[in-house]
Image (cartoon, rainbow, N blue to C red):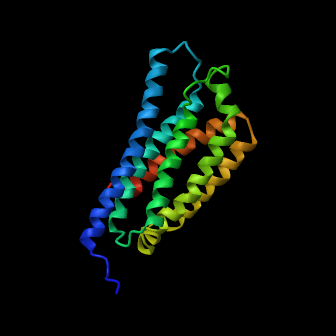
Amino acid sequence: MQHAPDPSSMATLYVHVRILLGMIVGLGLTHLLRHLARIVERPKARRVYWVHLVWALFMFMYLLHFWWWEFRLSNQVHWHFNLYFFVTLYALLLYLLCSLIFPESVDDYQDYRDYFYTRRHWFFGLLAVMFVVDFGDTAIKGSQYLHRLGGEYWFRNAAYVVACIGAIATRRPAYHGSFAVGALLYELSWIVRRYEVLA
């Protein structure tokens, strides 16, 4: 005979899951900061590209944002392996995006601008996947939580996906510059308006 899960044990299990998520997020943040420090230390080693740096800052903010809003998973009492696997893959996807923003070496490219445009298919393809996965991550926090986000949430993620497809299709600097700045400013606005306090 199966017994109902004990809420206290489920809360303890979430702490166990959160430790792993925190490790992955920490690795992503460390990766970004290490490479930004390398640019500061050796500014003439490779010419930087401002659009590329804006996306690095976007990923930095998104990682912090992710770690903040995943606190709501503490209300998820029915933990099972599939759910654990899903949220872990989401975190690993974020780390992979950080690795694509700053590879271990750009020796095969002229500079960061060349690297950014050459590898944009991978970055924006996975960024689009990230926003699709986010729908699932939001859904598991409950229908009330999803309802409170309103229609803007659905439009936000869909717009990001469409813009990512456009970024894959074009190398136009004006498009990429506008997308990068717009994405960063909107993400900051979204965080302040929705998640400044976990209420």
Position of 95 with respect to 155 (left or right) is left
Q: Residue furthest front?
A: 1
Decide: is 179 above or below 107: below
Measured from the top left, where is residue 13 in percent x and y? 31, 63
Measured from the top left, where is residue 73 in percent x and y? 37, 63
Decide: is 76 above or below 178: below
Quick one: 49 or 181, which is closer to the camera?
Answer: 49
Measured from the top left, where is residue 24 in percent x and y? 42, 45
Residue 118 appears in the picture as rendered: yes
| The N terminus - image quarter | bottom left
Residue at (50, 54) in percent of width and height: 90
Measured from the top left, where is residue 3 in percent x and y? 31, 83
* Quarter of the figure with residue 45: top right
Residue at (63, 20) in percent of width and height: 107
Quick one: 6 or 181, which is closer to the camera?
Answer: 6
Decide: is 196 above or below 141: above
